[in-house]
Amino acid sequence: MGKQFLEITEKKEVDAIIACVAAEVAKARAAKTDASVEKVKVAEALGRSVSADVFSALNVPPFDRAIMDGYAVVASDTFYADENNPASLIINGSISAGESPLQRIDKGYCMGISTGAPLPGGANATVKVENTSEYADNVEGKKTKKVKVYKPVAPGENIMLAGSDIKRGERIVRRGTTLTPRETGVLAACGLNEVAVHKKPIVAIISSGNELIAPGEDLEPAKIYDVNSQALSDSVRECGCSPYFLGIARDNIEDISGRLNESLEKGVDVIIISGGTSAGVGDPLPKVIEELGEILVHGVDIKPGKPFIFGTLQGKPFFGLPGNPTSALVTFNLFVAPLLRTISGIPVQNHEKGGGRKEKRIKAKAAQRIFSERGRNEYVLVNLVSAKKPEEASVIAYPILTGSGAITTLAKADGYIFMEKGKEIIEEGEEVYVELLTNLFASKKLYQKIP
Amino acid sequence: MGKQFLEITEKKEVDAIIACVAAEVAKARAAKTDASVEKVKVAEALGRSVSADVFSALNVPPFDRAIMDGYAVVASDTFYADENNPASLIINGSISAGESPLQRIDKGYCMGISTGAPLPGGANATVKVENTSEYADNVEGKKTKKVKVYKPVAPGENIMLAGSDIKRGERIVRRGTTLTPRETGVLAACGLNEVAVHKKPIVAIISSGNELIAPGEDLEPAKIYDVNSQALSDSVRECGCSPYFLGIARDNIEDISGRLNESLEKGVDVIIISGGTSAGVGDPLPKVIEELGEILVHGVDIKPGKPFIFGTLQGKPFFGLPGNPTSALVTFNLFVAPLLRTISGIPVQNHEKGGGRKEKRIKAKAAQRIFSERGRNEYVLVNLVSAKKPEEASVIAYPILTGSGAITTLAKADGYIFMEKGKEIIEEGEEVYVELLTNLFASKKLYQKIP
């Protein structure tokens, strides 16, 4: 059974409902890997999320290698050597990085060796070149190259044993890791040029409204340009998913249900519609969802975003976001992003997860008194300006008063402050947490100096 | 004149030399826009850096629009109206979002109007539907739809005037802005579907070493897999540039100069070689640079990264990084990234820039005593673990002792602590700043819970 229209649900409950659906969907995806996993070239894997633990098929290094330029020796030949009584060894050729030693060495012999070269059989240490001096000597009437060793080495000294860095079978990248240049480097070190990653979920995006036209088209009278399809597509990309734009729907049952069915036929994983979510007469969307699927949430006790809709269509999560661009982005961040990150395999960036650096949350000081509507969970949109202090970084948050309908609000709103029911005033200078609306905030905002 | 080999330069001086070259190159690029600027679809512009201020060609909203459902009225008709003496107006049709009003209204008349619809001529305010009631009346023996208005409205009330959000000619996106979903949304709002962005500089990447083979190939005896070409390519991508991999060079003058000339012919903007930077006999690289261009730096007073090389080849910045993967990444972050960000138009992420959130720098507590080599500027590689405290986020930094040659160091090293010459001990629990090796740290490290 679906909920009554605008039967307001508490935010916490909405989070729980969405988390539950997200977990189901993620589980279902994980079950049929063909739908959720793909192999990609490591060269194209930066930023992708690894779908299974990766293990090394080989030892790193694959052989005992010298880590100093010098001479590969039998350590015991050098014991007790010092400046006055150096050990003297016959040089049996030399070996440099990339070459494989042709012969082994026995006691009394050594081999010139360069950093990274494999240790010849018989040798178990490397003497640094600094602690030696070469000389020519006569051995059985034959001129012979020898080296004096002025310092003893212990077995294993100045060499790196095969597998001492990474053992064959050792786990090198953990499932769920978002690949950075470090992990792609580690994969390369183990000789891998392919890796299994989570497929990007496909998210259908529909804008609804009779007044909307697409950017690039000529502006007709009474029309305005569609903002949300662009802003939401890019927000979807930031969550590691692929947007699939289904165009602008007119505010009538046929057009909307047509596009919803189209996206279901295309096999998308999630559906987002913005606009037409209020329960007014002119808003067919809720009716359509009731027909095609199930409405689990219609109305949340937050501002902006009250008329938010969440439900399922044939098991696919469905989001109905407000038409106001800023409200749409706020509700996207609150409700859609966590679900997308869960099913895309990218860890949820959410301060409730606790720990360390918050990718999308920063501390700031309120620039002025901020008021919230009584008895409302309010998300106050703020513009952030960095107070240029040399050391201790500090950011000032200015509330934006133009309202969630204005595009300038979208342009200015770097993030929002949550004022929970009961919290009605934030004092000037009070420290607040600001949730950023987008990932790419910092680079844009706080470093404006461009060549 | 080029510097002597391994005439150690102070880090500060190296920074200055590189910054100076970076500024020159950026200036030169800016001069010939065909080389530095391209138009891209807004739909593909997320994360790109805008090359020139963008101005709106139209008013937003383009017309006076209602921001409430109700009735478009002549405000003066409603003055003095209240519950007992409502104003009474003849309803002259209605208009909804996306429609253009066909006729204007005069005093004594009104028009039903829905949120987002254009205000009809003559009207200068909207009365909320809540403050009205419709009824039928007889006007000159003719049944007529009328509405009672119980509350007065001032001129301009409940409407948004054309251009009150964004004025024609107003700047909507500033030059150098990295586009987020907000900016792409604002561009869409102004009807734009194309935007001019900085072209991605092309960075040639060469790995040098006789022992190296490419991942995916069979491992031959005495060989190891090339790590740096992968790790550096992805680091280059993180700086908003396009890597151009020129393969693995053998340690001889012909092969190296051949690949350098090839990259110059390809017209790359920057060249990075890793490996073969020390001044040893087996290292032809410095000689090659001396021949083809100019060495400005060879040797820095830091560890790791001492044998770092910086110079120019036919005016193109050239970097010679150590072969050790971790040393290569550290020197990349210290010296290459700032230059790449400068010329790619992406603001430099560098704490010296001051202000606000540091994309790549976080505070942490030392897990144990950390020692630095006397009289050395040392970058101590650390592994970060988040101490799971509910509120105040805190991160513990563990020094990594496996050395910059080990791949496990690369795998573990989330970042590094700078211990300046003179600072030889960091106490356990001491607060330190950690520079992250890669951008994507947070999502990987601090949120390991995956479905």
Image (cartoon, coloured by chain):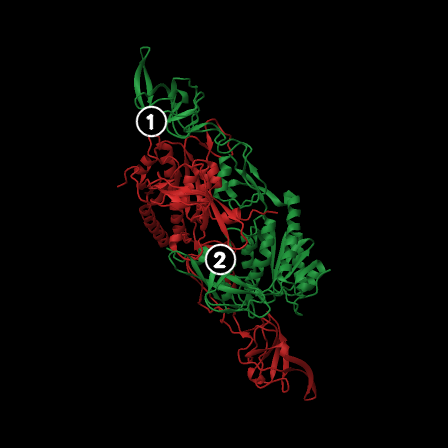
Chain colours: A green, B red
* CA distance for labels 1 and 2: 55 Å
> According to the image, label 2 marks what residue?
A362
> According to the image, label 1 marks what residue?
A131
Q: What residue sits 49% from the left and 57% below the top?
A: A362
Q: Is residue B67 left or right of residue A162?
A: right
Counting residues from the N terminus, which is met first, the one under dot 1 or under dot 2? 1
- Can residue A319 be seen by looking at this rendering? no
Which one is nearer the viewer's eye here, A24 or A410?
A: A24
Which one is nearer the viewer's eye here, B34 or B128?
A: B128
Residue A159 sits above or below residue B53 on the image: above
The disc labelled 2 sits on which kind of residue?
Ile
* Residue A114 x, y percent position in the rendering: 38, 28
Q: Report crowding for label 1: few under 14, some 14 to 19, many 20 or more residues within 10 A (C-alpha).
A: some
Q: Secondary structure at mark 2?
A: strand
The disc labelled 1 sits on which kind of residue?
Asn
* Residue B113 x, y percent position in the rendering: 61, 75
Chain at numbered mark 1:
A
Chain at numbered mark 2:
A
Q: Secondary structure at mark 1?
A: helix
* Residue B239 x, y percent position in the rendering: 44, 48
Give the position of the N terminus of chain B as an image quadrant. top left
Residue A319 circle label: none
